[in-house]
């Protein structure tokens, strides 16, 4: 069984992909960038502000799929500059204060719309 997740709690897809797919007991959330779901515009600010928006997007999408960030099992964080790791990690730690999911963090040469951070997530349904 495969279910497409689409919600106003996260930004609309800006390409040929779904916000998330629920399948076989998991929710696979596409990489989120700091787009405000109300305006579809990028949030201004540094990596701290952008990470907050990204995590709020992930939270909204995973909750619309019937789960929560507490059920996240894996994330992948893409940073424009690995020098932003500490600031991103401070925000990330507020959203995953206990039982944090497995994570990989990668410095990417370029991210969509030249943002500073993108995060994808897998959670239990």
Image: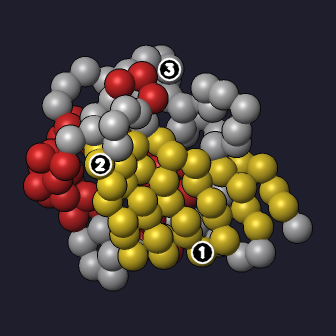
On the image, the x and y values in percent for residue 67 come to 58, 66
**Residue corresponding to mark 2:** 107
Q: Residue at x 40, y 33 (%)?
A: 111
- 81 in relation to 42, above or below: below
Q: How many marks?
A: 3
Discs 2/1, front: 2
Residue at image point 20% right, 41% down = 81
Q: Is residue 75 above or below residue 48?
A: below
Nearest the camera: 115 or 94? 115
Q: Secondary structure at mark 3?
A: loop
In this figure, which colouring scheme has been used for the structure?
Answer: secondary structure
- Residue 124 is tagged as 1
Mark nearer the N terminus (1 vs 3): 3
Which image quadrant: the C terminus?
bottom right
Task: First in sequence, mark 2 or 1: give its number.
Answer: 2
- Frontmost residue, 111 versus 7: 111
């Amino acid at each position: 069984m495969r279910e497409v997740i689409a919600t106003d709690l996260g930004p609309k897809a800006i390409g040929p992909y779904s916000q998330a797919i629920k399948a076989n007991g998991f929710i696979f959330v596409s990489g989120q960038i700091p787009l405000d779901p109300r305006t579809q515009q990028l949030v201004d600010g540094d990596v701290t502000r952008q990470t907050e928006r990204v995590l709020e997007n992930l939270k909204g999408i995973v909750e619309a799929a019937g789960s929560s960030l507490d059920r996240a099992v894996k994330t992948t964080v893409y940073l424009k500059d690995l020098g932003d790791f500490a600031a991103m990690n401070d925000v990330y730690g507020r959203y995953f204060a206990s039982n944090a999911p497995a994570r990989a963090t990668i410095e990417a040469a370029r991210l969509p719309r030249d943002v500073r951070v993108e995060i994808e997530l897998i959670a239990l349904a």
